[in-house]
Amino acid sequence: MEYAFALVLQICSVAFGCASPGVLPELYNTKYECAVQGYDKSKQMYIAMHESLPEPEKIDVYVKFWCDRIPKSDI
């Protein structure tokens, strides 16, 4: 069976946990591609959030990501 890997990013904070569902699902052919993009997109998202929050140090926001393996037959 062939698989694709879905990149899922989630915005979390120390104060509020990871209450939001994952965002920005994207598909990649390999887990390696998915993971590399996960690091790149997490960094971009973190920088954008940090610049947009009035007091980012007090909220302590971070980005969590993972790659879900999905059978290509289900896509």
Image (cartoon, helix red, strand yellow):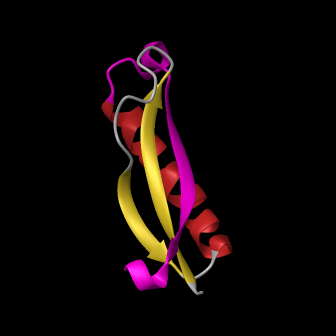
> Is 27 part of what is drawn in magenta?
no
1 left or right of 47 in image: right
Give how far across and how far down residue 57 sits, in percent.
49, 18
Give how far across and how far down residue 2 sits, in percent.
58, 87
> Is 73 part of what is drawn in magenta?
yes
Of the 4 image quadrants, the one containing the C terminus is bottom left
Magenta stretch in the rendered image = 53-75
Farthest right residue?
Answer: 32
Give how far across and how far down residue 36 sits, in percent.
63, 66
- For the image, the number of numbered tags is 0
Asked where in the image residue 34 lies, by quadrant, the reply is bottom right
Is residue 43 depicted above or below 61 in this figure?
below
Is residue 2 depicted above or below 42 in this figure?
below
Residue located at (43% from left, 22% from top): 56
Of the 4 image quadrants, the one containing the N terminus is bottom right
Give how far across and how far down residue 30 sits, in percent.
62, 79
Residue located at (45% from left, 12% from top): 58
Is residue 22 depicted above or below 3 in this figure?
above
Residue located at (55% from left, 66% from top): 37
30 left or right of 20 in image: right
26 left or right of 4 in image: left
- Pick the front one: 52 or 35: 35
Residue located at (45% from left, 74% from top): 27
